[in-house]
Image (cartoon, helix red, strand yellow):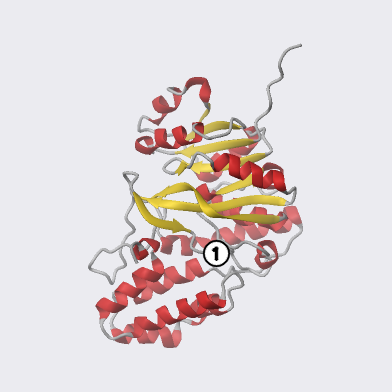
């Protein structure tokens, strides 16, 4: 009787666009998982930097898909047409997984038929792969995430590579419409959309690495050029500006496909702290005082009313923010960096 080959439980999908210098490390980390219960798919989004040759060099060890350049949303849509496993993990081509990531995720899903997503922390590394000692996100609580999303609260989530999904749930959100204004940010729809369909499992320790290789643009008020965010594809302020538009798309998907009514605008501390940093960083004392007096209401609301934070964290962030009123701009800027960018906390 022929030996039956078990079907893998998890597909690791690596979405790549012109990340040839990091791509092999991402693929190698996916192939080096401690369990064989995994298949690896690489979707190249029309790269022009030699990525195709790298992907083809892996032969049959990966399922290679080459699509015309269409953006991350199109890549997620395409992947979910092809995935044939119960679970999927989307790994950005500049990030990496620890060897036990897949086994840990599969065990979490297998332990409960209720999870629609498993999320975990990521170790932050530099562009050359050196550890920074920082992990993201700082807060990873996800209990009640679907219920709070219905009230507009975006729950604490890792970047895209820190999430794995139940495919049948994700396919109720995807495909997501692709147009000129909606080609990036596919992970937003996956991270928050799927939580409307069930419970999210949060694993406290890191199962992968998030690479920081693009310095965020300094604000116009800053002459120092110090980074205010970790983001690679978009800086934090750009993400904050896009958040409302992506929420609008998700709101339409939730209404039309799930019969779930979401509020018109989201509540998200990450977006509010980006706006706060833009207004306060490098600003004069008078300008900082004006922000506190007239423009800080929504920022402080996402602290005080945050349903995912402990009282201790609320008090700590509130207190740190108030230190930005210290007259010396150099001290205020240091505090803003500490609040806005986790790398500023390294070694603290």
Location of residue 329 in the rendering, given as x and y in whole percent from the top left corner: 26, 79
User: Who is closer to the viewer here, 144 or 238?
Assistant: 144
The reply, left or right, for residue 217 in relation to residue 185 is: left
Most distant residue in the top direction: 1
User: Who is closer to the viewer here, 196 or 342?
Assistant: 342
The answer to whether residue 209 is above or below residue 328 is: above
The answer to whether residue 25 is above or below residue 201 is: above
Residue that label 1 marks: 244
Image-quadrant location for residue 153: bottom right
Location of residue 47 in the rendering, given as x and y in whole percent from the top left corner: 41, 34
Location of residue 242 in the rendering, given as x and y in whole percent from the top left corner: 49, 60
Image-quadrant location for residue 330: bottom left
Residue at the image point whose x is 29% and y is 68% from the top = 220
| Count of numbered circles on the image | 1
Quadrant occupied by the C terminus: bottom left
User: Who is closer to the viewer here, 109 or 277?
Assistant: 109
Location of residue 280 in the rendering, given as x and y in whole percent from the top left corner: 35, 77
């Amino acid at each position: 009787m022929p030996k039956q080959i078990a079907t893998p439980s998890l597909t690791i999908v690596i979405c790549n666009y012109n990340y040839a210098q990091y791509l092999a490390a991402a693929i190698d980390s996916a192939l080096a998982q401690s369990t064989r219960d995994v298949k690896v798919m690489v979707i190249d989004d029309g790269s022009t930097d030699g990525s195709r040759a790298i992907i083809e060099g892996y032969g049959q060890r990966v399922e290679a898909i080459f699509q015309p350049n269409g953006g991350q949303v199109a890549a997620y849509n395409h992947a979910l047409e092809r995935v044939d496993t119960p679970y999927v993990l989307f790994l950005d081509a500049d990030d990496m997984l620890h060897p036990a990531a897949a086994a840990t995720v599969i065990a979490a899903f297998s332990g409960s038929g209720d999870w629609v997503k498993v999320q975990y922390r990521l170790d932050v590394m530099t562009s050359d792969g050196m550890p920074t000692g920082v992990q993201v996100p700082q807060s990873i609580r996800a209990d009640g995430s679907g219920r709070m999303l219905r009230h507009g609260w975006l729950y604490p989530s890792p970047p895209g590579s820190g999430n794995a999904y139940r495919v049948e749930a994700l396919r109720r959100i995807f495909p997501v419409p692709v147009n000129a204004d909606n080609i990036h940010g596919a992970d937003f729809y996956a991270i928050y959309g799927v939580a409307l369909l069930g419970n999210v499992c949060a694993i406290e320790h890191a199962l992968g690495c998030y690479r920081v290789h693009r310095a965020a643009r300094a604000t116009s008020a800053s002459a120092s050029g110090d980074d205010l965010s970790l983001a690679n594809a978009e800086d934090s302020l750009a993400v904050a500006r896009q958040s409302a538009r992506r929420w609008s798309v998700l709101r339409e998907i939730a209404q039309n496909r799930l019969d779930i009514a979401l509020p018109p605008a989201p509540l998200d501390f990450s977006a509010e702290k980006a706006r706060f940093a833009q207004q306060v960083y490098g600003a004069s004392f008078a300008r900082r005082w004006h922000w506190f007096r007239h423009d800080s209401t929504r920022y402080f609301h996402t602290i005080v009313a945050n349903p995912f934070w402990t009282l201790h964290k609320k008090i700590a962030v509130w207190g740190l923010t108030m230190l930005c009123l210290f007259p010396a701009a150099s001290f205020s800027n240091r505090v803003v960096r500490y609040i806005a960018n986790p790398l500023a906390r390294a070694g603290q």
